[in-house]
Image (cartoon, rainbow, N blue to C red):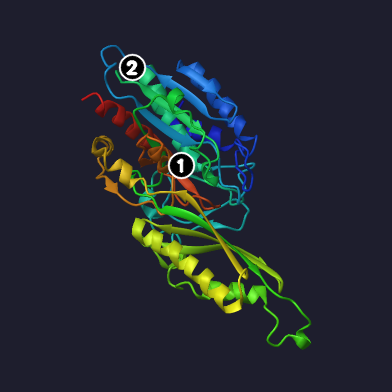
Amino acid sequence: MTALERFIKYVKIHTASAEDTAETPTTQRQFDLSIELEREMRELGMEEVYVDGHAYVYGALPATEGNENKAAIGFIAHLDTIPDFSGENVQPQIIENYDGGDVVLGESGRVLSVADFPYLPLLKGKTLVTTDGTTVLGADDKAGIAAVMTACETLIREKRPHGRVCVCFTPDEEVGHGASLLDMERFGADFAYTVDGGDLEQINYETFNAAAAKWEINGFNIHPGHAKNHMINASLVAMEVNAMLPSGEVPARTEGYEGFFHLTDMSGNVEKASLHYIIRDHDAAHFAARKETMRHIEALINEKYGPGTAKLTITEQYRNMAEIVREHPEIMLLAEAAIRRIGLEPKAEPIRGGTDGAQLSFRGLPCPNIGTGGFACHGPYEHATAEGLETAAQIVLNIIDENLK
């Protein structure tokens, strides 16, 4: 089965995760893909195949004779798609010998345009896979799953020598739960790669440091005709909180290593208001300063309006995995060599987000990220190419081959 055939099969299985639930998986529908992958892995002849009660799928290829002393390499991809845009009833459009121009996305009224995605002409002549404009495609991260499964099939079919290869497909990555219940002992890898990136030449080992900040604002509501020097409008105080943050340090105005404060949700009236932020920065000292800025604003608001007006809760989410991965340069060298073997020059670029690999690295499993060839994830313009999917599978194979040297 080709990587494209696998990919099309996987994206048609609805696996969107859900916010605001402590259960793992957050949606039972993720088991639909887990069970399909379990069946496929058994049919291929993989060993130690297992689906646990949280939808994690495990499998392995034991080392071939003479390679038992080589490092055990893991590959991880996630089952779920984003919860806030439909992943149900995905109807991929497959365009062979793509002409490099605009693509009408079904009858949705949306157009995948060169104006918005200026690299599209570079894909001319390839087999392009798009959505019909009403759903995500699911390349994030079913392209990763397809790449790993295709690589495993190739190893088995061609009887290629290899060290131990460990595979795990995880639920709930999109809502930050993906690595939390991965059984390290069952997985059995010495180090791993998440196959969950974009450009095929990219290797990502630097993530944001991340925290969530929740503000609860308590106002004082009386008749507006008698409000002078008494009313505290909680919604206006919430606006004041936001105005005290640097206006240029938001996602829409930052890039590369620049951090930000991101207001994700707000609600309120005169009596009560709430603000929800995510705080991100690659640099640990700058990250600490951002959190301290929030705490300073809380103190100023309570000094101005009275104790208890503002309550700030900061919740740590994940740390920059660079501090772990840098201690294991051989992992990066393997990936770099694998990418050069396909004729590309590897690029180490920071992730403006996080991956399962961030949490796993701090759990003792160094785990940078490699690409899948997916584009424009998390929306109706998501697309991929058949050639990119096959190349992603080849990079996985090349890493396994390089491990034998």
Instruction: Give the residue drawn at x 39%, y 19%.
Output: 61
Asked whether the residues under the numbered discs 1 and 2 touch, taking CB atoms below 8 Å apart as contact, a structural biologist would say no
Outermost residue, left side: 405
Dot 2 amino acid type: Ala
Closest to the observer, 348 or 68 = 68
Compared to residue 153, the image places residue 11 above or below, namely: below
Instruction: Give the residue drawn at x 55%, y 43%.
Output: 81
Q: Helix or strand or loop: what does disc 1 sit on?
A: loop
Question: Is residue 387 visible in the rendered structure shown here?
Answer: no
Quadrant where the image shows the C terminus = top left
The crowd level at tag 2 (other Cα within 10 Å; few <14, some 14-19, many 20+) is some
Displayed quadrant of residue 289? bottom left
Nearest-to-viewer mark from 1 and 2? 2
Q: Earlier in the sequence, mark 1 or mark 2?
A: 2
Compared to residue 168, the image places residue 121 above or below, namely: below
Question: Is residue 43 visible in the rendered structure shown here?
Answer: yes
Which residue is denoted by mark 1 in the rendering? 96
285 relative position to 6: left or right: left
Which residue is denoted by mark 2 in the rendering? 63
Compared to residue 259, the image places residue 95 above or below, namely: above
Q: Helix or strand or loop: what does disc 2 sit on?
A: loop
The crowd level at tag 1 (other Cα within 10 Å; few <14, some 14-19, many 20+) is some
Rendering coords of residue 371 (x, y %): 38, 42
- The tag on residue 191 is none
Rendering coords of residue 337 (x, y %): 23, 36
Closest to the observer, 331 or 285 = 285
Marks 1 and 2, Cα distance to the nearest angstrom? 38 Å
Outermost residue, top side: 65
